[in-house]
């Protein structure tokens, strides 16, 4: 017992300060994390409340100012709403700029970046060079893309506008035959397919 007690005493002499320091550090860290979480929660509540007021009031200038200073997710929502407001006013270029800002913000989840890019492309389909649009749409139309069906609809539209009706029909046919495609996407594809099929044999510049 004496030997055991001596070993314990020696162990405490050698390691006691580390044990006490570790315990104190754990307490401080736990308190800091709790404080940070509470502060983060309160900040998010305040940001969400402010954003909701701005959206309700439809104050475009304040929305865009809010987006410059808010955290990434609140800023993203503010930009989406502001872009929609610009479109309602017929200010297409301003909406495109906001969508491009969202698409280029790497801190945002890629699903939302892709949505912003799709929306930007839908507005630029009449103005940008077809080869540039095709390249961007190819990146969004892959099987793993969350917005692939919208991107494929835009691909079909772009092909049709270039007179490539057979290509447009092929893209739309794949959508109609895809059991995983949303019902509204398939319905639109069927409607466009009936229009494009009639024109494909005589207008397709890629046909023999």
Image: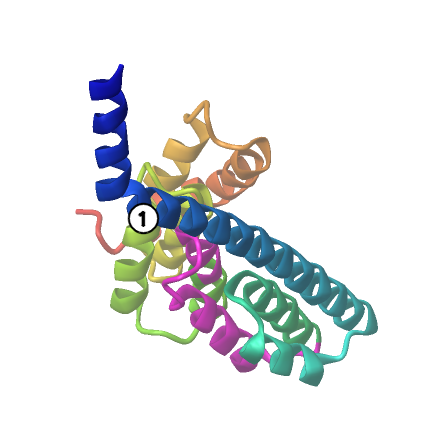
Span shown in magenta: 89-116
Q: Is residue 82 magenta?
A: no
Front residue of 184/206: it is 184
Residue 167 at least partly seen: no
* Residue 88 higher or lower than 141, as above or below: below
Considering every residue shown, the one lying at the far front of the view is 2
Figure quadrant of residue 128: bottom left
Pointer 1: residues within 10 angstroms few (<14), some, or many (20+)?
A: few
Q: Indicate the quadrant containing the N terminus: top left, top right, bottom left or bottom right.
A: top left
Q: Number of callouts in the render? A: 1
Tell me residue 103's x, y (percent): 41, 64
In this rendering, would 17 be left or right of 198? Answer: left
Q: Main secondary structure of the magenta part?
A: helix
Return the residue at label 1: 17
Identity of the residue drawn at 47% across and 47% down: 150
Q: Position of residue 33 (x, y in %)?
A: 52, 52
Q: How is the image coloured?
A: rainbow
Q: From the viewer's perspective, is 161 left or right of 50?
A: left
Figure quadrant of residue 117:
bottom left
């Amino acid at each position: 017992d004496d030997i055991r007690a001596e070993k314990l005493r020696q162990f405490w002499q050698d390691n006691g300060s580390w044990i006490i320091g570790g315990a104190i550090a754990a307490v401080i860290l736990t308190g800091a994390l709790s404080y940070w979480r509470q502060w983060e929660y309160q900040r998010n509540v305040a940001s969400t409340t402010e954003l909701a007021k701005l959206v309700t009031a439809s104050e475009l200038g304040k929305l865009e100012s809010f987006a410059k200073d808010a955290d990434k997710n609140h800023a993203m929502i503010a930009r989406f709403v502001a872009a929609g407001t610009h479109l309602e006013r017929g200010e297409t270029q301003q909406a495109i700029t906001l969508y491009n800002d969202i698409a280029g913000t790497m801190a945002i989840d890629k699903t939302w970046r892709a949505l912003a890019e799709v929306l930007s492309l839908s507005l630029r389909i009449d103005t940008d060079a077809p080869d540039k649009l095709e390249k961007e749409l190819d990146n969004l139309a892959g099987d793993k893309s969350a917005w692939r069906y919208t991107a494929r609809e835009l691909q079909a539209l772009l092909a049709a506008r270039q007179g490539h009706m057979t290509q447009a029909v092929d893209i739309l046919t794949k959508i109609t035959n895809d059991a995983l495609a949303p019902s509204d996407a398939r319905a639109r594809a069927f409607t466009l397919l009936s229009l494009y099929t009639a024109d494909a044999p005589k207008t397709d510049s890629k046909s023999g």
